[in-house]
Amino acid sequence: HLERIMAGTARHDREMALNAKRLLSTTVDPVERLRLQCLARGSAGIKGLSRVFRIMDDDNNRTLDMKEFLKGLNDYGIIMEKDEAVKLFQQFDRDGSGLIDFDEFLITLRPPMSNARKQVIMEAFRKLDRTGDGVITVTQDEFMNYYAGVSASIDSDVYFIVTKEEFLNYYCGVSASVDNDVYFILMMKTTWKL
C-alpha cells in the first residue's frame, strides 16, 4: 500500500515540476518566480536552496547579506537577472538593514499550506524527534533500514540529523505536489504510522 502512495507522490512531484516550469514563463512577481524555480526541481527544491544558504551563512548568524544571497542563488542554479535578485533581496530586507532573516525568507518562500497539513507534518516530526530537542537523529543503519528499505549492517556511529526546518521545507514541497488535503494527510499518516 505504501508503495502505491509513494508512486502517486512521485507522479504528483513530476506534475508539480512541469506545472511550475509552465507558470514560470508568465509569472512576474520575484518571490513567486523564485518559489516556482525551486518547485520545478521537485519536492526537495526549497530544502535544497535552504541547504545552500546555510552553507553560505559563513558567520552562522542565520541572516544573509546581499553577497551571500546572490552567491547562494547562483550556486543553486537559480536563473535570475541581477536587478531582479536585488529587488527580491530588498523585498525580504523589511527593515532596510542590508540583511534578511534566513527563517523568515524560507517561511515566505514555502508554498501556502492548510493548517491540517501543517499539523500532520508537525505530528510526524514530534513522533520522530524522540528526545524533544528539535532535531531528528538516526544512525546510518536506521536510515538504510527504515527510510531506504535496505537491510544493512553498516557503521552505526554515523548519524543523520534532520532539523525541524529541513523537515518542514521538504514536506512543504511534497505538499505542493498533492492537491487534495485528505490524500496528503493519509500519505503522511501511512508513511509515519501516525
Image: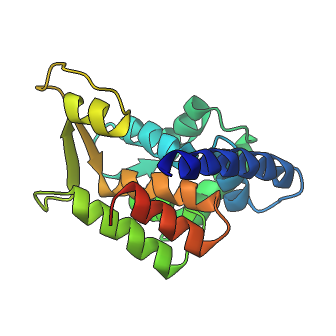
Task: Return the residue nearer the eye: 187 or 130.
Answer: 187
- Please count the marks in the image: 0
* Residue 173 to residue 112: above or below: above
Task: Return the residue nearer the eye: 128 or 62.
Answer: 128
Q: Position of residue 72 (x, y in %)?
A: 52, 37
Residue at horizontal 66%, vertical 48%? 13
Does residue 95 appear in the picture of this structure?
A: yes
Residue at horizontal 32%, vertical 69%? 123
Q: Furthest residue to the front? A: 1
- The image's colour scheme reads rainbow
Q: Furthest residue to the right? A: 26
* Residue 8 to residue 90: above or below: above
Residue at horizontal 32%, vertical 67%? 194
Does residue 85 appear in the picture of this structure?
A: no
Quarter assignment of residue 119: bottom left
* Residue 119 to residue 159: above or below: below
Q: Position of residue 7 (x, y in %)?
A: 60, 45
Q: Is residue 73 left or right of residue 36?
A: left
Q: Position of residue 127 (x, y in %)?
A: 23, 62
Q: Furthest residue to the top? A: 154
Residue at horizontal 47%, vertical 51%? 170
Q: Is residue 159 left or right of residue 185?
A: left
Task: Return the residue nearer the eye: 187 or 119.
Answer: 187
Quarter assignment of residue 10: top right
Q: Position of residue 61 (x, y in %)?
A: 28, 50
